[in-house]
Image (tube, grey):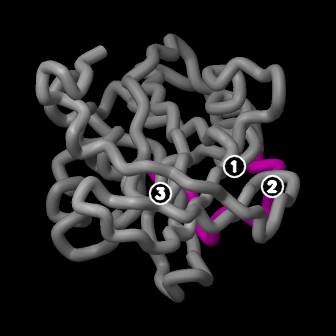
Amino acid sequence: MATEADGQELTRWKIHGERLVDDTRRDRVSIASVELPDGVTFEQWVFRIRKAAMMAVLDDQDRVLMLWRHRFIIDRWVWELPGGYVNPDEDPAVTAAREVEEETGWRPLDVEPLGSLQPIVGSADAENLLYVARRSEYIGEPEDINEAERVAWIPLDTVRDRITKGEIVGAASQVALLHVLAFYR
């Protein structure tokens, strides 16, 4: 790791303390007292959220399996990839596959990791682990009726336009889909 001696740690913020605001089963919210390299101090909200896993399921017709759902926090209807929080001691790939089955009624096959991302790195530790499945099999109606208004196979050719129109706004969905468009076609 680089040090101040070689000029690489000069912009690191100092953390003087952190006080807990809320600690629930999924999230931990706190306020950190931080100091910038120039000596300015302030308080920063910090969100630590359980890992989530999400999967882009592809078919042989160049489509991706997606959910049309309402997100109350932003009060919008959006397309998203299936996914959910990783249970303690659960393999994230297993989480992603389980969530696909529960939310869509399709079982993903040939699952591969795509990578991970931190969607709001300046305020939160909320790692999203991304996967892709090149095939799937239909196993029945979705188990979880609370997840989506509609489950549909969306042509990959429409993804960029849907992002531009604001139909796909979730960071993890965008990153996974753009990765698929760049490397899996």
> Is 168 in front, or is 45?
45
| Dot 1 or dot 2, earlier in sequence | 1
- Whether the magenta-drawn stretch holds residue 18 is answered as no
Q: In the shown orientation, is residue 5 left or right of residue 152?
A: left
SS type, badge 1: helix
Tag of residue 80: 3
The residue at which mark 2 appears reads as 144
The furthest residue to the bottom? 75
User: What is the crowding at mark 3: few (fewer than 14 residues within 10 Å), some, or many (at least 20)?
Assistant: many
Image quarter hosting the N terminus: top left
- The reply to whether residue 117 is visible in this rendering is yes
168 versus 71 height, above or below = above
Residue 124 image label: none
Q: Quadrant of the C terminus?
A: top left
Of 18 and 128, the residue lying toward us: 18
The answer to whether marks 1 and 2 mark residues whose Cβ atoms lie closer than 8 Å is yes
Magenta-tinted stretch = 141-153
